[in-house]
Image (tube, helix red, strand yellow):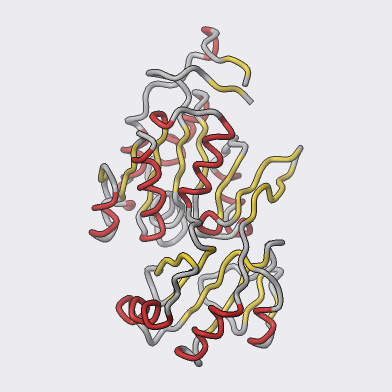
Amino acid sequence: MTAAPVGTGTAWLVGLDVDGTILLQDETMSPGVPEAVARLRDGGHEVTIATGRSWMGTQRYVEELGLTAEYVVCSNGAVTMRRAGDGWERWHVETFDPSTVLSLLRERLPDARYMVELGSGQRLYTAQLDDWTLDGGRQVLFEELAAAPVSRIVVVSPGHDEEDFHRLVADAGLNEVSYAIGWTAWLDIAPQGVDKGTAMERVRARLGIDGRQVLVAGDGRNDIGMFGWALGVGGRAVAMGQAPDVVKDAAGETTGDVVDGGLATALDTVPAPIDVGAGEVASA
């Protein structure tokens, strides 16, 4: 791979959320995104994905966008994938013992549906979860969910709203894990101190890209940590126009709604592509 010196027109690290940022609700691309991504990619910028989705639910969009990035951040930062020859490997995986958390949650949400993602990427679940990719997963009894370390716990409880989940987390004393509340009735729990931002920092450091040459974009509460990281290293954090106020408040900038091509608008503000032919790109 190649990298360019820091400065106007040099290589940026661009990390993009998927749902509500790259994708519309029907899972088609937001207007202008493929073209904007291609411009940055072909210019030598490192455009990647940073998503709450598992790798299984992410790879197709890496391929559809023709991304050439070496690393992709999945599972809210708990899993970072790296290219390995013609395929991919699980380069960095964070896990934790889920037993205490699962016990606390079951006491308070006995009728909820639960899923865990193992360090290997396999998913174990107690019942079907709508909107979640469960290909290759296995339905198990609740007790088996805690049999091995996991990279995430997902709890789906349609009878509860965001305020209910916030109270639940406080009442259960879930201070040993990080959590994010989804647009609908699910709670996504990751290892303590792990989010998209921690994974993106690992990628940035590995690639040797200056923090001032970072742009991230997203629309959900699970993007707040990534926004804080980007701003902290001197980069840019862009919230989508339809994002909740708490997400917009965490970002340095706000763009248009996803249905209006807000991401493409933000990407078009990244400095002009690197002139590879002019010899500005140096081997890393």
Residue at image position (50%, 92%) is: 110
- Measured from the top left, where is residue 193 in percent x and y? 48, 57
Give the quadrant of the C terminus.
Answer: top right
Residue at image position (26%, 53%) is: 248
**Quarter holding residue 262:** top left
- Measured from the top left, where is residue 195 in percent x and y? 48, 55
> Vertical placement of 18 versus 143: above or below?
above
Give the quadrant of the N terminus.
Answer: top right
> Vertical placement of 144 versus 202: above or below?
below
> Vertical placement of 238 versus 207: above or below?
below
Residue at image position (42%, 41%) is: 33
Is residue 220 toward the left or the right of residue 202 in the image?
left
Q: Nearer the viewer, residue 132 or 66?
A: 132
Q: Looking at the image, which residue sits at the far top?
A: 278
Residue at image position (63%, 59%) is: 56
- Measured from the top left, where is residue 125 in percent x and y? 63, 79
Task: Please tell me how many numbered marks the rendered image carries.
Answer: 0
**Quarter holding residue 254:** top left
- Measured from the top left, where is residue 268 in percent x and y? 35, 31
Q: Nearer the viewer, residue 241 or 3?
A: 3
Q: Nearer the viewer, residue 224 or 233?
A: 233
Q: Nearer the viewer, residue 29 or 57?
A: 57
